[in-house]
Image (cartoon, rainbow, N blue to C red):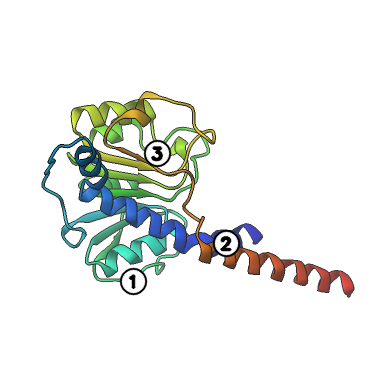
Amino acid sequence: IELRRAVGTNARGVAELALTLTLAGLRQIVWTHEGMRRGEWPRRLGREIADARVGVIGLGAIGATFAQLCLDLGARVVGYDPFANADRIVHPNFSRTGLDEAIGGVDAISLHAPLPEDGRPLLTAERIAGLTRGCVVVNTARAGLVDADAMLTALERGQVGTYATDGFETEPPEAEPLFAHPRVVLTSHIGGFTDASVERSTVRAVENLLEALAVHAH
């Protein structure tokens, strides 16, 4: 219960970061910025989120908040979560699908799921190879959800347009070829690191302490 409460306090912050990374990928913000810093004039046709189909893997507090933000901006959203209630999100532009349907045929994917029990990534080499060409993949959950070698290959081939991640196996992460790719966006586990999230977490921690003290007092 306390874990669910802690996640809930940070849900908005993580969801907003996921949305920021999604928009940055759709509009090639980081790639364009780096080109400008080198004195170039890079221009690549972007996508508007209102014209995009977004797949959300995991519809817990964070995934559902992210999905609602995308819906509010006019996106069509497909979600996968075998455990979330059927009425978790109700919107004419939202539909629940299987995992492969939520990954295939979308312009952007955002991962908000736990690691599978078998330890294998959800985005396997096979699934990554089947993504819509130019797809944006955002991972603010866990590094192990994505096959890193397959992701690098997909980026080099243009199968994936942008890979953005806020999660790493070790922090700070060790250097690896995937992180050096020009269309990879890295953030240092800042999803829930906002002033509002820290305040909500602090308030929740104090409330939990007071509840525990009240129980022991009786």
Q: Residue placed at 44% from the left, 26% from the top?
A: 175
Q: Earlier in the sequence, mark 3 or mark 1?
A: 1
**Side of 202 relative to 146 (left or right):** right
The residue carrying mark 3 is: 122
Q: Residue placed at 53% from the left, 38% from the top?
A: 117
Asked if the residues shown at circle 3 and circle 1 are in contact, with their CB atoms under 8 angstroms apart, the answer is no
Q: Position of residue 34 (x, y in %)?
A: 25, 39
Q: Residue placed at 43% from the left, 51% from the top?
A: 112
Q: Earlier in the sequence, mark 1 or mark 2?
A: 1
How crowded pointer 1 is (Cα within 10 Å; few <14, some 14-19, many 20+) is rated as few
Residue type at numbered disc 3: Leu
Residue type at numbered disc 1: Val
Q: Is residue 21 visible?
A: yes
Mark 3: secondary structure? loop
- Residue 122: image quadrant is top left
The residue carrying mark 1 is: 90
Residue type at numbered disc 2: Val
The residue carrying mark 2 is: 198
Q: Which numbered mark, 3 or 2, is in the foreground of this view?
A: 2
Q: Which numbered mark, 1 or 2, is in the foreground of this view?
A: 2
Mark 1: secondary structure? loop
Q: Residue placed at 55% from the left, 64% from the top?
A: 9
Q: Earlier in the sequence, mark 3 or mark 2?
A: 3
